[in-house]
């Protein structure tokens, strides 16, 4: 059974269970920083899973547009290029569209 990080979707072998969320080590620090900040600001109930999924939606979601039948090799190449550029796939695709002059 593949287990995925709730914040980035990676399938790294050593995921950490925090609350009801599964997180890779890279994402654990980011998610816990947000959770701790909210707790320090007085929020009583902060869900680690909700914060992790919020990060996933913001960083890795396509937003309002869904590309159906996105070829796997093209999707992988786009994700790799976006990661190298330090962007989400959404940001990278939008940048490419803007550069194309559309």
Image (cartoon, helix red, strand yellow):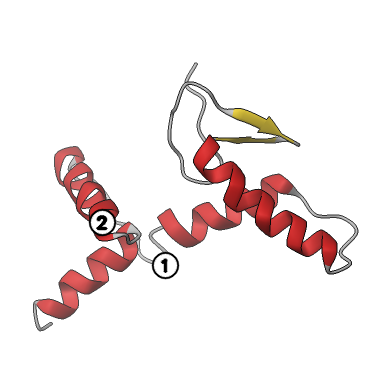
Q: Outermost residue toward the left?
A: 100
Secondary structure beneath dot 2 equals helix
Nearer the observer, 3 or 28: 28
Percent across and percent down for residue 64 are: 42, 67
Q: Residue under circle 1?
A: 64
Please determine whether, in this image, residue 99 is positioned above or below residue 26.
below
Residue appearing at x 24%, y 53% in the figure = 84
**Residue 41 placement: quadrant:** bottom right
Q: Position of residue 55 (x, y in %)?
A: 55, 56
Q: Which residue is mark 2?
A: 82
Q: Residue at x 80, y 54 (%)?
A: 46
- Residue in the image at 89% along x and 67% along y: 42
Which is closer to the viewer, label 1 or label 2?
A: 2
- Rendered residue at 83%/59% (across/down): 39
Classify the position of the C terminus by image quarter: bottom left
Q: Which of the labelled discs sits on residue 32, or is there none?
A: none
- Mark 1 or mark 2, which has the lower sequence index? 1
Query: Counting other residues with Cα less than 10 Å from the Cα at mark 2, is it few (<14), some (14-19), or many (20 or more)?
Result: some
In the picture provided, is 22 more to the left or to the right than 9? right
Looking at the picture, does residue 35 appear above or below residue 101? Answer: above
- In the rendered image, residue 47, in percent from the top left (x then y), is placed at 76, 50
The reply to whether the C-beta atoms of the residues labelled 1 and 2 are less than 8 Å apart is no
Q: Describe residue 35's horizontal placement relative to residue 16 as left or right.
A: right
Residue 26 position in % (x across, y down): 50, 42
Count of numbered circles on the image: 2
Nearer to me, 7 or 32: 32
Closer-to-camera residue (13/98): 13
Decide: few, some or many residues near mark 1? Use Cα within 10 Å; few <14, some 14-19, many ≥20. few
Q: Whole-Å distance between the Cαs marked 1 and 2? A: 19 Å
């Amino acid at each position: 059974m593949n287990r995925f990080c709730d914040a980035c979707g990676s399938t790294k072998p050593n995921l950490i269970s925090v609350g009801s969320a599964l997180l890779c080590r890279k994402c654990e620090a980011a998610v816990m920083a947000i959770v701790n900040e909210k707790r320090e600001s007085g929020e009583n109930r902060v869900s680690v899973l909700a914060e992790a999924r919020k990060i996933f939606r913001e960083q890795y979601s396509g937003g309002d547009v869904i590309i159906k039948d996105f070829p796997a090799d093209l999707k992988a190449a786009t994700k790799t290029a976006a990661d190298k550029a330090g962007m989400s796939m959404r940001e990278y695709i939008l940048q490419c569209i803007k550069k194309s002059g559309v």
